[in-house]
Amino acid sequence: MKEFDFTKLTFEDALSQLENIVRELEAGKIKLDDAVDAYEKATTLKKFCEDKLKNAQLKIEKINVASDGTINTEPLDKIEE
């Protein structure tokens, strides 16, 4: 498989490429060697997208303003509904 540089790839671009690869694989019109390469790239793109989403989730926080005006944050997953 050719090395692919993901450093300048956005989440949306990676997701689009992943969707295209899946469509091509599902269509079955790819030669076997190319299909293997495409599958390997798709696996890498999937992990890249998962990592981007996880990092974005870690950055999301709830902002709290106390009665005295002080501001603090807490992870969004600690919010009780």
Image: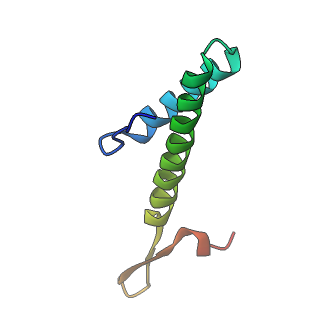
Residue 9 figure quarter: top left
- Percent position (x, y) of residue 58? 48, 66
Above or below, 41 relative to 67: above
For image coordinates 47% across by 68% down, the residue present is 61
Farthest bottom residue in view: 68
- Percent position (x, y) of residue 28? 69, 15
Farthest front residue in view: 33
Q: Is residue 35 left or right of residue 8?
A: right
Judging depth in this view, the residue of 75 and 9 nearest the camera is 9
- Percent position (x, y) of residue 55? 45, 60
Above or below, 13 relative to 49: above
Q: Is residue 25 left or right of residue 62?
A: right
For image coordinates 29% across by 41% down, the residue present is 8
- Percent position (x, y) of residue 15? 51, 35
Farthest left residue in view: 8
Chosen colour scheme: rainbow
Judging depth in this view, the residue of 13 and 66 nearest the camera is 13
Above or below, 56 relative to 48: below
Judging depth in this view, the residue of 64 and 35 nearest the camera is 35
For image coordinates 51% across by 73% down, the residue present is 75
Above or below, 74 relative to 81: below
Q: Is residue 67 left or right of residue 80?
A: left
Residue 81 figure quarter: bottom right
Q: How many marks?
A: 0
For image coordinates 55% across by 38% down, the residue present is 40
